[in-house]
Amino acid sequence: MDPVKHCARHRRFVGGSSLWLLALVLCACQFGCVQRRITIRTNPPGALVYIDDYAIGTTPCSTDFIYYGTRKVRIVKSGYETLTVMQPIPAPWYQYPVLDFVTENLIPGEIRDERTVEYQLQPQTVVPPQQLLERAENLRHAAAGPPLPVPPAGPVYNGPPSARPGLPASPPPAARPGSIFPN
């Protein structure tokens, strides 16, 4: 067999298989992704939900998210205490650095990470007006502190003494020789 023909055939095979391998990797990269979603439920339902100070909707509601970590969740419903929680959303094992590249880019198909969080709302307590006024008065007295001492009676200060007629009120400032500024 002619060595020149063999090398040319080998180069065509290696070049062709490299091209197919590259095409296969590119196709696999098109399919991999991770969908992250959090669902919030409350008892009773119908509460307005804010995540990181953005309104999401009324419960039960869901939203997609991109990053794992701790989120500020605030839940508001008329007649119930407002609930504010720092909710941790830990990353699953396949989202740790290096592994996340593989799961998001090389594994064909879609990976779904769905989280559900449930909260129990507490009824709002109504304080009777008389009790509220008493608490306010107690706080007012506590904030006032001890009474300030009254200054002793004595002569009244009327300002600096006035100059006598014919004399200047104060001597003019003296300047140092060679200086434009007074001492």
Image (tube, rainbow, N blue to C red):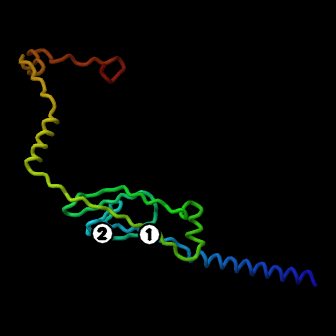
- On the rendered structure, is 171 left or right of 97? left
**From what the image shows, is residue 151 above or below residue 103?**
above
- Circle 1 sits in a helix, a strand or a loop, which is it? strand
Identify residue type, mark 2.
Answer: Thr
**Where residue 70 appears, x then y in whole percent?**
41, 57
In percent of width and height, residue 171 lies at 20, 16
Residue 58 rendering spot, x and y as whole percentages = 28, 69
Q: Which residue is mark 2?
A: 59
Establish if 86 lies above or below 174.
below
Q: Quadrant of the C terminus?
A: top left
Q: Residue 97 location in percent, x, y? A: 57, 60
Q: Is residue 32 left or right of residue 70?
A: right
- For image coordinates 62% across by 76% down, the residue present is 26
Query: Residue 84's image quarter?
Result: bottom left
Q: Residue at x 11, y 41 (%)?
A: 137
Q: Nearer the viewer, residue 152 or 102?
A: 102
- Mark 1: give few (<14), some (14-19) or many (20+) Cα within 10 Å: few
Badges 1 and 2: C-beta atoms under 8 Å apart?
Answer: no
Residue bearing mark 1: 114
Asked which quadrant contains residue 121, the reply is bottom left
For residue 137, side relative to residue 32 (left or right): left
Q: Secondary structure at mark 2?
A: loop
Q: CA distance from mark 1 to mark 2?
A: 16 Å
Q: Nearer the viewer, residue 6 or 44?
A: 44
